[in-house]
Image (tube, rainbow, N blue to C red):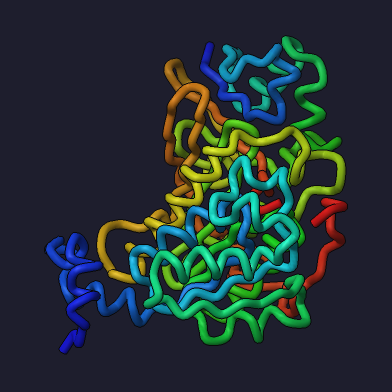
Amino acid sequence: MTDFTDEQIERYSRHIILPEVGGVGQRKMLDARVLMIGAGGLGSPAAYYLAAAGIGHLGIVDFDTVDLSNLQRQIIHSTERIGMLKTESAKKTITALNPDVNVTLYNERISSENIRELFQGYDYIVDGSDNFATRFLINDACVMMNKINIHGSIFRFEGQATVFNPQDGPCYRCLYPEPPPPGLVPNCQEGGVLGVLAGIIGNIQAVETLKLVLGIGKSLSGQLLIYDALNTEFRKLTLKRDIHCPVCGDNPTIKELIDYEEICGTA
Amino acid sequence: MSVKVRIPTPLMKLTNNQAEVTAEGGTIADLLNNLESQFAGMKERICEENGAPRRFINIYLNEEDIRFLDGDKTKIKDGDEVSIIPAIAGGAV
């Protein structure tokens, strides 16, 4: 029924012996299709662990190349790969770790033009993007295409994570109806980030993805997890679907995808 | 009422890097005015000119978003905790 090779039974033995996973769960992971937006701070740890877990189909969207200043946190890349496309570098690491994973690369900047095509064929979208324009675009496309959005973001010593599941909870615009105007909130590299914070939040995104794939536990849908690294505090706040939400509300006003102006100059 | 207010990283430069401050008020609106009197510039960062919180910043009373309570008229009682949570974008770069 689950059809594993001897090598797979050994590779995934610590999963298979978990009653919550078993052979059936491992098969679900091998059949799952997950799209990573960004192979950067959040995407690196998330893709790395999802690959180790045996997520069978991983898509990776990124148009950037590996830079020395990335390596403080983007652990899927390495010093010898500086200048290489991040997608290519990520694939090398993933394939070396687990040849079971089929990796599909999209060396593209995500926009309203290509996002539907990118999302088609994937059930779970892991948002590891670095700017509001992309985050709002990802959200709107997920709502319109009924995809689950596993969200994470980081700033200095603080991170946020949640799951936006169009089937049972709020979306990003229920939280924040519109992106902030340039200059009012820090974006991208501004202010810096503790490298390992990306690891914590990216891995929370990986755990949430696996739980959804396996259908176990209680997802972060409807809750915003806030991690304060300086004070070692995790807090959960309640998120509610907003019936007036411009995209997932009862009378949506946003019916087309919007390309907001990139607030971050370098992304 | 005197309550604990959680200050998000982007606003900590206004509070001398304190992540947690104490403020007073019977409602969220009073509390925001009290914060402004302690930390000049705070209200402008959190609210639009008409006094409503900006659309990319949410205010939580304990675990609940005040937009789903009584907005800035939401009443505060002793022992409550208020959190100011802005959207943050960082991730990949």
Taking A230 as reference, is B73 above or below it?
A: below
Taking A124 as reference, is B47 above or below it?
A: above
Q: Horizontal and vertical percent for residue A255?
A: 72, 79
Going 62% across and 25% down the picture, which residue do you hit? B7
Residue lying at the far front in this picture: please name it.
A80
Going 82% across and 39% down the picture, which residue do you hit? A184
The reply to whether residue B73 is visible in this rendering is: no
Q: Quadrant of residue A236?
A: top left
In this picture, residue A23 sits left or right of residue A183: left
In this picture, residue A257 sits left or right of residue B91: right
Taking A199 as reference, is B29 above or below it?
A: above
Count of marks placed on residues: 0
Q: Horizontal and vertical percent for residue A82?
A: 71, 55
Comparing B41 with A13, the one in front is A13
Q: Horizontal and vertical percent for residue B84?
A: 61, 32
Q: Horizontal and vertical percent for residue A98?
A: 39, 69
Comparing B42 with B16, the one in front is B16
Going 37% across and 63% down the picture, which residue do you hit? A52
The reply to whether residue A90 is visible in this rendering is: yes
Going 79% across and 57% down the picture, which residue do you hit? A267
